[in-house]
Amino acid sequence: MTRFLVLAISLLWATFAQGAEAPGAPGAPGAPWVSEHARDHPLAGRIWQPEAARFVTPEAVVAALGQARFVVLGEKHDNPDHHRIQAWLVGSMIAAGRRPALAFEMFASDQQAALDGHLAARPKDAAGIGAAVNWAKSGWPDWELYQPIAQAALDGGAAILAANLPRPLRRALARTGVSALGAERVAALGLDRPLPEELAGPLREEIAVSHCGQLPASMIGPMATVMTARDAQMAEVLRRGARLVGHDGAVLITGKGHARNDRGVPFHLRRGDGAASIVSLGLVEVAEGVTEPAAYAEILGAEPLPFDFVWFTPVADPEDPCAKFAEQLRHARERHEKDTTAPE
């Protein structure tokens, strides 16, 4: 994954420590924003509840999260304000008496031992987690963005869980399908029941669009398989986390595509337990000229918006992602050509 540029860590921490206020919500993250673009958009800092078709306060969100066994917080990975909000939500839940395990998409299950080893030696040291799991080579944005989220959990005595599938296993899934997991694991994750086509079709379309139409058609199906398997795995980790001694639920930090109610992690949680109480929150950057919350459903390729709450924020990076992707492909082709034409 391409490394993302982030603002100075001192600025992030200073802003987080200020307890800046969103409209009507003392202490909730908001202005002054860390993200520099579209700060004055009418929706920036506002929270929309699609089912009720109304704006709500951050306190109302915290109250809803406090009633749920499972909470899924979907982000745009490179937006520092998304991580400020996630840290505030986790801390607010704990302050209200909840003790959820905290799972991260950014950690794969083969890193759990390193996480556990570090936290056994230094139980409150969120800062040291990055070095413990070799985060600098992971391709994710800087660990300092995620550190306040982990610190909020550790300060409340919550477990930190690695939610994702290991990279080698994801590659095997792309090559051979769910059989790479083995029959027992396929059944345990519910992957013996394929995603219904009314959900699988839009997922494949989303993958194609999000890669700017540059993917070979042969890659789209395997990538959808990997995405679905990752969602099922993360749902299983949340179930396991909620059963840990001293915990009363689980929270997932993940990309907003995984947080979707229609086909993401919440879908797999409900598939495993139809009575499970789940709240998903999508952190969504505002779009220029789009001031009606419901209009973001089309942008996300869903109708209606596929989250229980949508928290709108300014934009971290306004550059066209397809222009970025095209540049990455160009560099990749140049490296390939150089490698294949270099003299032996």
Image (cartoon, grey):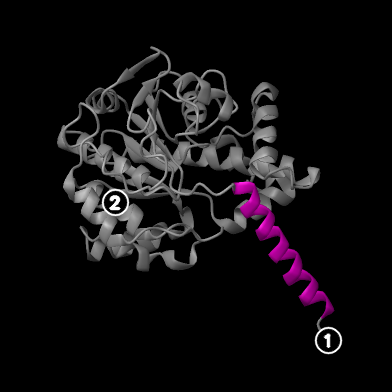
Residues in magenta, as a range: 321-341
- Rendered-image quadrant of the N terminus: bottom right
Residue 185 appears left or right of 259: right
Residue identifier under label 2? 150
Q: Mark 2 to mark 1: distance in Å?
A: 49 Å
Report if the CB atoms under discs 2 and 1 are less than 8 Å apart.
Answer: no
Q: Is residue 326 magenta?
A: yes
**Residue closer to the observer: 181 or 286:** 286
SS under mark 1: loop
Q: Main secondary structure of the magenta part?
A: helix
Query: Percent from the top left, x then y, of residue 109?
Result: 47, 53
In the image as oriented, which residue stretches furthest toward the top? 52
Asked if 279 appears above or below 10 in the picture, the reply is above
**Residue closer to the observer: 127 or 43:** 43
Residue identifier under label 1? 343
- Rendered-image quadrant of the C terminus: bottom right
